[in-house]
Image (tube, rainbow, N blue to C red):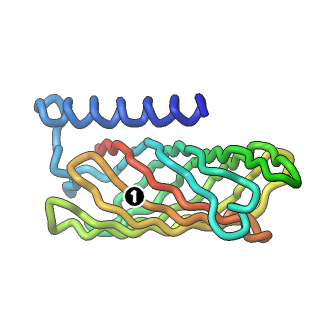
Amino acid sequence: MIKQLLILTITISAAIAGYAQGKSGNIQDVSGYTQEKKWNIAGGGGFAMPINLAKEFCNAGSNAFANATYNVSQTFSAGCEVNYTYLTSKTTAEHKTANTDFFALMAKGVYTYRKAFLSPYFALNFGWYKAQEDPGEFGYAGEVGVLYSRLNFGVGYHIATSRGFEYLQINIGYRITF
């Protein structure tokens, strides 16, 4: 529980500080994309919850992410993402499970509608998901969200392994373009 609260506190603090700095004029291009700025770096975290089969043996937890993308056009960017998710153990009358954590290294494609102050986006990720002692397997994720200035708010749906381990992430992040 302390690990999740620490990740969430750091994420929210960084997002608020970054947003305040952008509003004060110390960061250029607060409005987002320009043709001259081709790279995006983002980081953040949030709340993670197991769904379907996974909710039988895990409780909610937290996650953190970092990604870098290259703007191929005004609406499409491609890059990679590193994602860490921590789900807490669940105790039932029959048994107690261990905490579950996933590390994912994924390719990422993002489509962003950039004609509005609030810019909705859709992302697809695919790559390698590794859980504790598991050797790792291919997995994929879909994400929808909105960009507001340099902040992003998103919801991601991850299928981490071929065994069908699924979880949902609700994230807040901060994005820098250059």
Q: Amino acid at mark 1?
A: Gly
**Rendered position, 20 above or below 158:** above
Q: Residue 68 at what x, y percent from top left?
A: 45, 49
**Residue identifier under label 1:** 154
Residue in the image at 40% along x and 67% along y: 144
Label 1, residues with CA under 10 Å away: few <14, some 14-19, many ≥20: many
Q: How many marks?
A: 1
Q: Is residue 1 left or right of residue 65?
A: right
- Kindly give the residue lying farthest to the front in the view shown: 93
Image quadrant in which you'd find residue 107: bottom right
Residue 64 in the image: state x and y as whole percent: 53, 42
At 36% from the left and 31% from the top, the residue drawn is 14
Name the spot of residue 75 as percent of width and height, x first: 29, 69
The picture places residue 15, in percent across and down from the top left corner, at 32, 37
Above or below residue 98? Residue 33 is below
Residue shown at 48% from the left, 48% from the top: 67
User: Residue 174's image quarter?
Assistant: top left
Q: Is residue 115 left or right of residue 93?
A: left
Q: Quadrant of residue 115?
A: bottom left
Camera-nearest residue between 23 and 50: 50
Q: Is residue 138 left or right of residue 3?
A: right
Residue that appears at 65% across and 67% down: 159
Q: What secondary structure is marked by label 1?
A: strand
| Quadrant location, the N terminus | top right
Which quarter of the image is occupied by the C terminus? Answer: top left
